[in-house]
Image (tube, rainbow, N blue to C red):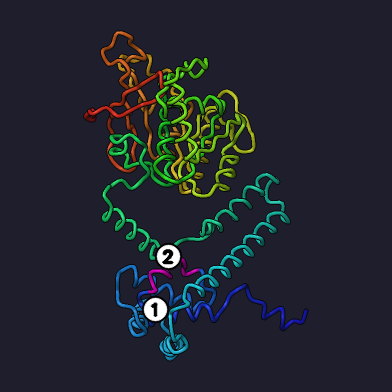
Amino acid sequence: MAIDELLSRQMPHNLEAEQAVLGAMLIDADCIKDVMDKLQPDDFYIQQNREIFETVYTMFSYSKPIDGVTVADEMQKNGVYQEDVTRSYLAQLIEMTPTSANVMEYVAIIRDKALLRSLAKAAGEISKMVQEGLGEAGAILEAAEQRVYSIRRGRSSQELIPISQMIKPYLDRLNELAAGKTDLPGLSSGFSHVDYKIHGLNKSDLILLAARPGVGKSSFALNMALNVAKQTEKTVAVFSLEMSREQLLSRLMASEGLIDLSTLATGRLSNDDWAKLTHAARVLRRTDIRIDDNPMLTVADMNAKCRRLDHLGLVVIDYLQLMSSSGGRSYAGENRQQAVSDISRMLKIMAKELNVPVVCLSQLSRANEKRDNKRPMLSDLRDSGAIEQDADIVLFLYREDYYNEETDKKNIAECIVAKNRHGETGKVALRWMPQYTTFSTVEMRFDDE
C-alpha cells in the first residue's frame, strides 16, 4: 500500500450525510426533535460538524430559536466560532439542503458509520489486551463483552459525558412525569405504599431485600417480579441459587391463581383449583419472565446473560450469600466478608451497566434475635457492611408472628425501608398469605421511628 494512501486512511464516515442533517435542522426546526432522539454529538466524525450539532443540541435543550444566525452567535459565545469560516460554512449547509424531507435517512447513515467506528475502536482495544496479555482469558472475554454491549446500548463505557448532553434527557424525563397521571418515576413493585416510600423500582438501583429465613423474602421478590412482568412488556430475569425453576413456577402459580401451595405440591386439585390454575397459566404465558436456577452462577455470568436480553426491565437474585465471586473464586472463614463485599460491589456495577433495577435478596445475621426488639437493623446485614454501602435501597421484612405465635398481628408483615437514596425511610404494613406465598398491601402505614 502506498504511503500517501496509508496517511489518508480515515475511519468510516459520510460527510454528505452529516452536512445534510445539519442543513435540515437549520432550515426546518420541526425536524430537530426527531434528529435529537437518534443522534449524539459524538456520532459526527468531522469536528466542525460535531461542534455545530452540539451547539444546536444545547440550544434545543433550552428551547432557544434555532437558525443559521442564532447558531453562529451561540457558537461564538461558546468559543467554537472561527472567524470567516463558521458563518460561511453554516450558509453553505443551508444552501446545499433544499428540503428536510429525507433527514431521517441521512440520520440512519450517520448512525451506521458511528457504529462502525465504535466497533473498530473496540476491536483495537480488545486486540491490544490480547497481544499484551492484560489479564486472564476469562477477564479479557468479560471486558470484550462489556465493550461490545456498551456499543449495542449506544454508549461508551470509556468516555466522559458532558453535562450539556445530559440536560435534555433529564428535562424530557421531568416533562414525562409532569404530563403523566402518576408521580412514580420507576417501575411499580405492586405494593403501592412501598412504591410511595421508594418511588418505585428505578433504573440502575441496587435494591437489597433482607430477612431471616422463612419470613418470606423470596415470595416478596417473586411478587414484585410478577407484577413488573404483568404491568409492562419488559423482560424480568430471575436468578435462583436456592430453589429450582419448578419450585419457582409453583410459587408463581400459587400467587397468581391464589391456590394453596400444598395443594399444588400434592396434585390433589379440585375443579375450582383447576380453573384457577388455568387462569394463572394463561396470565404467566403472557409475561416474559426468564428463570435460571444454576447454583454456581457468578455476577459476571448473570451480567453476560442479561446483556443478551432485549427489553430487560428487572433482575431478581436469590440470594447474595449463595453467590461465588467472579471467576469462581471461593472464600472461607474470615475471607467470606471480603467475598460478599466484592459481590455486592459487582452487583451495583451490573445495575448501572444494564440500567435496570436489580433486586438482590440477602440473609440477616442472628444478632436481632438477641434483642428485645427483633426488628432488623442495617447492622444485622450478614457478612459485610459493604452491602449497606453499595445498595441504593435496603428493605427488611419482619413478622411479629415469626417470633411470637400469640401475637394479635397474625400474618401481618412489615416492610422496613432502612436505607433509601431517593427519599424517606420508614415502615409499611403488608398482609402475608402463606398458603399462597404472596403479600398484599394493608391500608395502614407506620410512622417513622
Above or below for 408 versus 172: above
Q: Could you tell me residue 344's position as x and y percent?
A: 49, 36
- At label 1, which amino acid type do we have? Gly
Mark 1 residue element:
loop
Left of 288 or right of it: where is 141?
Answer: right
Left of 353 or right of it: where is 327?
Answer: right
Mark 2 residue element:
loop
Above or below for 50 versus 217: below
- At label 2, which amino acid type do we have? Asp
Q: Which mark is residue 253?
A: none
Residue 120: image quadrant is bottom right
The answer to whether one can see residue 180 in this image is: yes
> Which is more toward the observer, 351 or 191?
191
The residue drawn where x is 28% and y is 52% is 180
| Magenta stretch holds residue 49 | no
Instruction: Read off the residue under disc 1.
Output: 79
Q: Which mark is residue 37?
A: 2
The residue drawn where x is 47% and y is 35% is 284
The residue drawn where x is 53% and y is 59% is 156
Q: Could you tell me residue 322's position as x and y percent?
A: 55, 27
* Prevailing secondary structure of the magenta residues: helix
Quadrant including the C terminus: top left
The residue drawn where x is 60% and y is 40% is 301
The answer to whether one can see residue 210 in this image is: no
Task: For the residues labelled 2 and 1, say whether their Cβ atoms are less than 8 Å apart.
Answer: no
Q: Magenta stretch? A: 31-42
> Which is more toward the observer, 51 or 443?
443
Give the mark nearer the N terminus: 2 vs 1. 2
Left of 178 or right of it: where is 344?
Answer: right
